[in-house]
Image (cartoon, coloured by chain):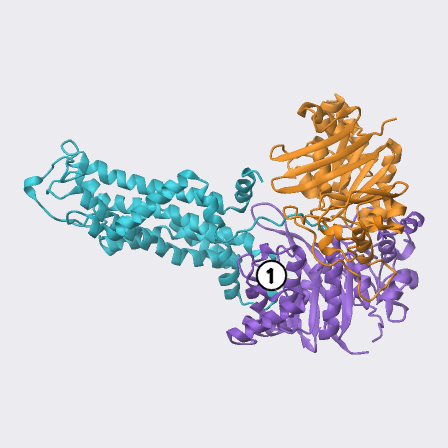
Chain colours: A cyan, B purple, C orange
Amino acid sequence: MSATVAPTSTPLPARQRGETLRLLVRNRIAVVALAVLVAFIVVAVFGKALAPYGYNSVDVADRLQGPSVHHWFGTDELGRDVFSRVLLGAAVSLKVGAVAVGISLVVGVPCGLIAGFYGGVLDDVIMRVMDVLFAFPAILMAIAVLAILGPGSTNAMVAIGIVYIPIFARVTRAAVLPVREEVYVRAARASGASDLRLMRRHLLPNVLGPIIVQTSISFAFAILSEAALSFIGLGTQPPHPSWGLMLSDGTDFINQAWWMVVFPGAAIFVVVLAFNILGDALRDTLDPRQRSLIRNARGA
Amino acid sequence: MSEPLLRTEALRVAFPVHGGGVVRRTVGHVRAVDGVDLEVHRGETLGLVGESGSGKSTLGLALLRLVEPTGGRIEFDGTDVTALSRRNLRALRRRIAMIFQDPYASLNPRQSLADTIAEPLAIHGLHPGRSARARRVAELLEMVGLASELGNRRPHELSGGQRQRVGIARALAGEPDFIVADEPIAALDVSIQAQVLNLLRELQRELGLTLLFIAHDLSAVEHLSDRIAVMYLGRIVEVGPRESLVASAGHPYTRALLSAVPVPDPSRERERRRILLKGELPSAMSPPSGCRFRTRCQEVFEPCDRIDPALQDVGDRHCAACLQHGLIGDPDARGEDVGAAAGVPDRGP
Amino acid sequence: MAPLLSVHDLRVRLGDAQVVNGLSYEIDAGETVAIVGESGSGKTMSALAMLGLIPRPPAVVSGEVHFDGAELVSATPAHLRAVRGAGMAIVFQDPMTSLNPVLTIGRQLTEGMEVHLGLSGRAARERAVELLEMVGIPDPRHRLDEYPHRLSGGMRQRVMIAIGLAAHPRVLIADEATTALDVTIQAQIIELLGRLQQELDMALIWITHDLGVVAGIADRVLVMYAGRVVEHGTVDAVFDAPQHPYTRGLLRSIPVLGQHADALPSIPGTPPDPENLPPGCPFWPRCEVRADDRCRGEVPPLREVAAGHLVATFEKERV
């Protein structure tokens, strides 16, 4: 071990308040993605107010009409306004994404924390369980869970949430391993801190970066998964508007009414893409080494 | 002389080394601390000097059981530290505090400085209540020479010297009796080192602290310490009062160390005759048989490879583990698993 | 006869920070010059700038560095590449990160030889063994095929020195080369470099913050503070009669073996931030002398106060 190191002239780059946002804003594409997601949330929350028609306003006379002034996205096979259903479907996607990711976080992060912190047998046991869960293809797992719980969007949220627990556990554990060795953790232990305190106050705040990135990405996958499950009839049940369900319905009419497929499909595509872009951008800005690269590129 | 506040007896800390392969095998142990008997008296500053691989930092960590001893005993104020339960260990960690070397790594970057300093208070339930705690934090900041407004800042906003002061404030928060300072000034700029040394001296006097000052910088150690102990490859090779150790060292390693320390005086430097050590530090997994220093010693002679020297008196409260002073030690053919317990010397009060 | 290396008014700017603010000195073969300073003094930057190791832009480098008949600040990248290693070599502080962990020692040694010496294959290996012997590494032939992680810190630093010497440099720059080493190993390395310097008739520039080391190895000393030279003279002159308040303060604040004082007189405050320098003398905020009204607003120029002894302070002008 070396005896001493000459003091460096500048301390390691550190996080300043608001710096994350400022650095993020440098990335133009990320800004666009962020704007899209903000719009998504606004639409999801205020959908009812924004939608010109209800989600189930059937008007058989007007069925399968193309996009027009009255119906921007056209109508479906029951004469319902596709635009309104897309807007209201956003709420479903947001809810499913949030609840599913929420479940994964609440279970996965503590598992990763405990496994990473204690190591040894506990680590082995927890991570082997996670490995088993992870080995199943996500959709098959979700289907299995729904077979037990029964179909419906609420159960879909739970199923998807369970499926994504292992990834959060892994990401958290990987982030915990280096932080666990940090001197300030040892210093807190030297002051008499309990394990719980160490995990809560010293480990968790310092591993948030990768967890946040994973949250963004998992949100995208959750929305996609819900669409897939609804597509095969296991998720949101008709007549509730879910983008996946709309896709499924639309495939039957794809030759006569392309708008029934294209618009919900585009909605899924745009939102998922935006979450992924945001996740990547966050990863770049939150990684301390990348931060200094971005700073230096500024021309310091 | 006062009775020792802290004592170790044949303390050992060994780390397993794993071999490669599919199944993890233990191929040996790094004997970082390999049989250390140490005493620190109430109110004194004991300097612990050693180079890489000496085990001095590991020893410091073991005293708080931040690494677990694998043999021997630690006694603090009459209590057997090595046998303490977890709950009682927490109470102990209020009475013994630690200052760490790297001011950039020893503070949680996500916590305000006030929260960092107040952590021992929160853990041990001291100064309960928001305002009482805030007062104590302000008091501590002042004690280490920092403005109390700095409490709201985060570590990255401060310089290295300031961060180290925060580390000292944190160590003092729970009003400890004993402080282990592990290389507290090594990572600081030269002009700041003197400031922090002065601060430590002042605080020790004012608060009546007992200090174990672990460092590789012999000049700084000599400046602050009452007694000095020298470690080599997991053992204490010499211990004695500051002046006596520096003026008439009893162990060849201490003499080499003293001769290697550069002095900022060109004429003295020109006249110096440096003792250059041969070779490299031996492996801590299998130290040399007999005296572990013999592979590098310029004064090695016949019995050195078969007797492991015990600490012997070479002056007033001053002992060194070298066969030059007498053939007292543990005769052994190989360096494997030998306890230095045989021939426990009379070390005086 | 022109000196081997001559630096004239070297300045380096990085963004808002003037990290080197007018550095001038000369050095000849066989001489050892020590550049002393703390964080933010600019001592390392100056060496990197000389060798063109700081990317420009973003750095802005001005001034002149004359070496071996050519000027380096305005030199082409090709010329600088030729100078690096063969004319001037630099040994860095941390051998753990300065050596490539996935290349053997031998490979790292022979890398530069092809370019600078036109040696390859067996000839290069022989030279590598020679170099390892020169720096005192036992069993050099076997070492060639070992990886850095198998060597101790002291050994690695010796390998770094061997790499530095591989192409017969005229000037060797040691940048905190012994700071991370144990003091007994440091003594060995210092002795080694002194011996090599004599044998190879090299000029040695030693960059460090350790005044004890400086006292033992330097002929002349430059003290830097906040990018400027504040004192420059022979080692005896600077240590026995320091003229600048910073030098004096620094010397007094170092604990010295065998001298036991109560409290160490220390310089108050902290080394300055290169992006936020005060308008006048950079040392003013920490100075206990403050001899003159000009100190606060004007930067004192570097002036000769005795033969070969320069200092940048208004304190001495009043005489």
Query: Which element type, helix, strand or loop, lies under badge 1?
Result: helix
Residue A138 appears at what percent x and percent y?
33, 46
Residue B175 appears at what percent x and percent y?
65, 74
Q: What amino acid is labelled 1 in the image?
A: Arg
Relative side of B125 to A108, left or right: right
Q: Residue furthest left?
A: A61
Residue C222 appears at what percent x and percent y?
81, 43
Q: Is residue B24 above or below residue C308?
A: below
Residue at 54%, 47% (x, y): give it.
A288
Q: Across the whole image, how many numbered discs are drawn on residues?
A: 1
Residue at 32%, 49% (x, y): give it.
A141
Q: Residue furthest top?
A: C118
Relative side of A152 to A10, left or right: left
Instruction: Please state which of residues A104 and B327 is positioned toward the viewer in this rendering.
Output: A104
Using a 10 Å C-alpha cutoff, classify the residue at mark 1 as few (fewer than 14 neighbours), some (14 to 19) or many (20 or more): some
Report the chain holding disc 1: A
Specify the quadrant of the image occupied by residue B59: bottom right
- Judging by the rendered image, the residue that carries numbered circle 1 is A186
Instruction: Please state which of residues A231 and A258 is positioned toward the viewer in this rendering.
Output: A258
Q: Is residue A249 above or below residue A116?
A: above
- For the question of whether residue A148 can be seen, the reply is no
Residue C229 appears at what percent x and percent y?
77, 43
- For the question of whether residue A95 can be seen, the reply is yes
Relative side of B139 to B262, left or right: left
Instruction: Please state which of residues C124 and A83 is positioned toward the viewer in this rendering.
Output: A83
Specify the quadrant of the image occupied by residue A270: top left
Q: Is residue B81 above or below residue B256?
A: below
